[in-house]
Amino acid sequence: MPLCLVAGAPLGPWRRLWLGWLHGAVAWLIAVPWLSTMLTVYGGLPGVASAGLVALLAIYLGACHGLFCWLAGPALGRRDALSLVLAPAIWVSLELVRGAGLSGFPWNLLGYAWVDVPGALDATRWIGSLGLSGLVIAFGLGLLGLVDRATRRRAVTVVAGVAVLLTVARWTSTDRAAAAGPVLDVRVVQPNIGMMTDDQLLGGLDQSSIRSSYRRLFELSHEACTPGALVVWPESAGWPYELERDAAFARDLERLVGRGCSLLFNSARRFGSGEEEGAFNSAYLLTPGDVRANRQTYDKMHLVPFGEYVPFARYLPGVRQLARNTGSFSTGDEVRLLDLESARLGISICFEIVFPMQVAARVRDGASVLVTMANDSWYGATWAPHQHLRPARFRAAENGRPVIRAAITGISASIDPRGRVLATAGIDETAVLRMPVTPVDGMTLFSRAPLLAPLLCLLLAGFAILRG
């Protein structure tokens, strides 16, 4: 909770800006140090260069903190009841911009800090994660206001109001969501296959590891595959093999699905040829029967810059991407649900799960179950997999949908429509996670209008800035 941001309200505007910026940059350096290790080990960058890039990212992200202190200072200086509404609106607006600016980076939204606060996840079905961030700011301002006798009464009102809202959200949430179909028998395979560096691959040192990982993946999958079950693989589980390029891989998949289960997995999907060849980062759903006829695909729509493509690649010839494929991925151009007999699956591949509006669009299109396929092996046993799990919990609660999370080295999870984690497979654990999943119908207020709370905050923020 950024109480230190609002404490600078009595200072001059430029001092608020720089102190807030410094606070934000330090906070981000503490939150994402694992990016530096990833860039060094898998990006081939010197340690100093990796640390410098992470520092630049922290400076960029810290600007939101600085702008909040600068813009919210006049409102806080008035010390009136309205400031306790206008200042949170400014924070929410800045988080909205952070999630949309450049390629978008809505990582570690402030509302996520309340992931285990009773009622917080439930409240997001009305106001979303961004709205919850506003409540966190309002609650923090209220606590700060309790110190000053002049603002104590208003502060008590705000703190009590937030507490009442969370209580109402909790007690009006039920587990009686309308089922959209029979229970799915889902089996998430977590093969615990780690990343390999280019030096290892080029040196041929890990060809035996690739074959060993491949065998383990299919052994676990055959164990999981029973008639009627849905087997889910994480992102990159079958790498370096591709369904449409490797005949042996395609035959192994066909034999697996021939046992009577359906298989949801990730693979590159090629198009074009020669210099015009490209690839999508895709999810495939194979169902029993004619595998070629029963093949459905979804192409990832929100790619990771420098991970899956290089922005302005023409002007950055020395920069290579981190993703393990030839050339850059292309962006999918439509929301495409994958249909089982009893469910419609809304897929988010890795980074996509952190975008609330994008996931809500899948629900509006009819998704009854949400699935996220992730490869967090880049980061090892750091905070990153835990940070990546939280958005999945919030997407479940915001949309009132169960979420199936498949992660290649953990944390795989079964998440219910209220964002509660029902079962997990931990980091560096090899497991088959069995979970019954009930498809859900109907939509929350957030699913219907995900921009309602953020746009209201934008209007209030504009008023606060003009009010001065």
Image (cartoon, helix red, strand yellow):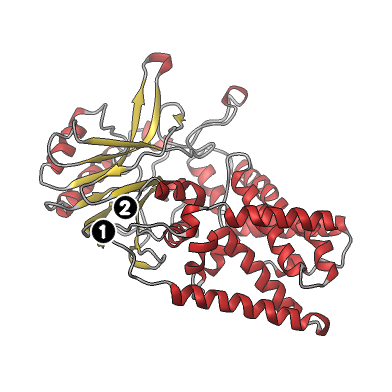
Instruction: Tell me the residue at 26%/58% (across/down).
Output: 431
How would you rate the neighbour count of disc 2 (Cα within 10 Å): few for under 14, some for 14-19, many for 20 or more?
many
* Camera-nearest residue between 75 and 325: 75
The location of residue 221, given as percent across then percent down, is: 19, 49
* Camera-nearest residue between 353 and 385: 353
Mark 1 and mark 2: Cα distance apart in space: 8 Å
Instruction: Tell me the residue at 41%/35% (across/down).
Output: 324
Image quadrant in which the C terminus is located = bottom right
Residue 431: which disc? 1
Mark 2 element type: loop
Is 103 situated above or below 374? above
Instruction: Tell me the residue at 24%/28% (across/down).
Output: 246
One can see residue 226 in this view: yes
- Residue that carries the numbered disc 2 in the rendered image: 192
Of the image marks 1 and 2, the number of the one nearer the N terminus: 2
One can see residue 65 in this view: no
Q: Which amino acid is tagged 2?
A: Asn
* Camera-nearest residue between 199 and 60: 60
- For the residues bearing labels 1 and 2, Cβ distance under 8 angstroms: yes
Is 120 situated above or below 252? below
The location of residue 267, given as percent across then percent down, is: 32, 36
Q: Is residue 338 left or right of residue 58?
A: left
Kindly give the residue lying farthest to the right in the view shown: 12
The location of residue 286, given as percent across then percent down, is: 22, 40
Q: Which amino acid is tagged 1?
A: Ala
How would you rate the neighbour count of disc 1 (Cα within 10 Å): few for under 14, some for 14-19, many for 20 or more?
some
Q: Quadrant of residue 182?
A: bottom left
The location of residue 416, given as percent across then percent down, is: 35, 64
